[in-house]
Image (spheres, rainbow, N blue to C red):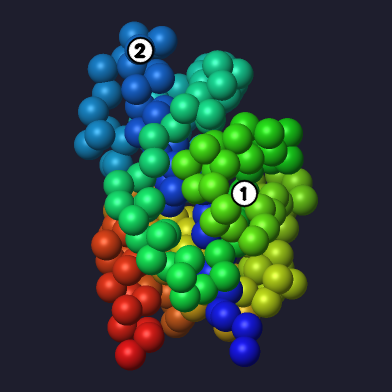
Amino acid sequence: MSRPVIAIDVDDVLAGANQAMMHYINEHFGANHTWEDYTVAGPYNRYWEKVVWQTDSEEGAKRYNAFINDGTQRRMPVIQDALEVIGYLKKHYELVIITGREQEYMDDTHHWLQKHFPKTFQGIHFMPYKEDGVNKVHKAVVASELGVQYLIDDAVEHCIPAAAAGIKCLLFGDYGWNKDAELTEGITRVKDWKAVQKYFEKAAQ
Ligand SMILES: [Mg+2]
């Protein structure tokens, strides 16, 4: 029998994008923000610009583009305990990546995954396209096509449609954009990778 498939997100699940952004903006734009500032509750869409920086969209785009163009996606830290728990999961499950990143960041994404998680994922899937920073095709569509049973993602915007499609969702992390999210049936909160491991140990019993 083939093993169950878990789809895993990249930013803020495996890679510390929020953390990397905080350090980058503090260093290059003279800000003095703390982790507390970067976890204030607020909407997911353009969270940094609207909630943390409170800038207009021009300045927001300038900061975001500087961060991306500096190759920061290649240098993001690995989220705590991800290496160890992914090592555990890959013994029991098929693991695939479904990232909301645009396809133009494919090289940087592959590079980062290969560096930190070699020979781990059966596939790395990008979303077809975005409009104004928002994925126009939900991960639920891609995940269903791949026959995924579980999705680990920090965005409730992806978890809700995936859960409605019958995929068990783990809403990852205690982030500003998900802490106040109302969960629908089939979504479980996991605050960190240790909690992910506990979830799957229980599922295996
Ligand atoms: Mg994410």
Q: Residues within 10 Å of mark 2 (few under 14, many from 20)?
A: few
Residue position marked by numbered label 1 in the rendering: 100
In the image, is the residue at mark 1 within 8 Å of ligand 1 by its beta carbon?
yes
Q: Looking at the picture, which amino acid does disc 2 mark? A: Glu
Q: Residue at x 43, y 74 (%)?
A: 187
Residue position marked by numbered label 2 in the rendering: 27
Task: Judge by depth and name the residue closer to the eye, 178 or 16.
Answer: 16
| Residue 93 higher or lower than 115, as above or below | below
* Mark before the other along the chain sequence, 1 or 2: 2
Q: Residue at x 64, y 61 (%)?
A: 122
Left or right of 153: which side holds 162? right
Which image quadrant is residue 170 in? Answer: bottom left
Q: Looking at the picture, which amino acid does disc 1 mark? A: Gly
Task: Judge by depth and name the residue closer to the eye, 52 or 153.
Answer: 153
| Residue 69 higher or lower than 152, as above or below | above
| Residue 159 higher or lower than 75, as above or below | below
Quadrant position of the C terminus in the picture: bottom left
Report the Cα–Cα distance between label 1 and label 2: 26 Å
Q: What element carries label 1?
A: loop
Left or right of 184: which side holds 139? right
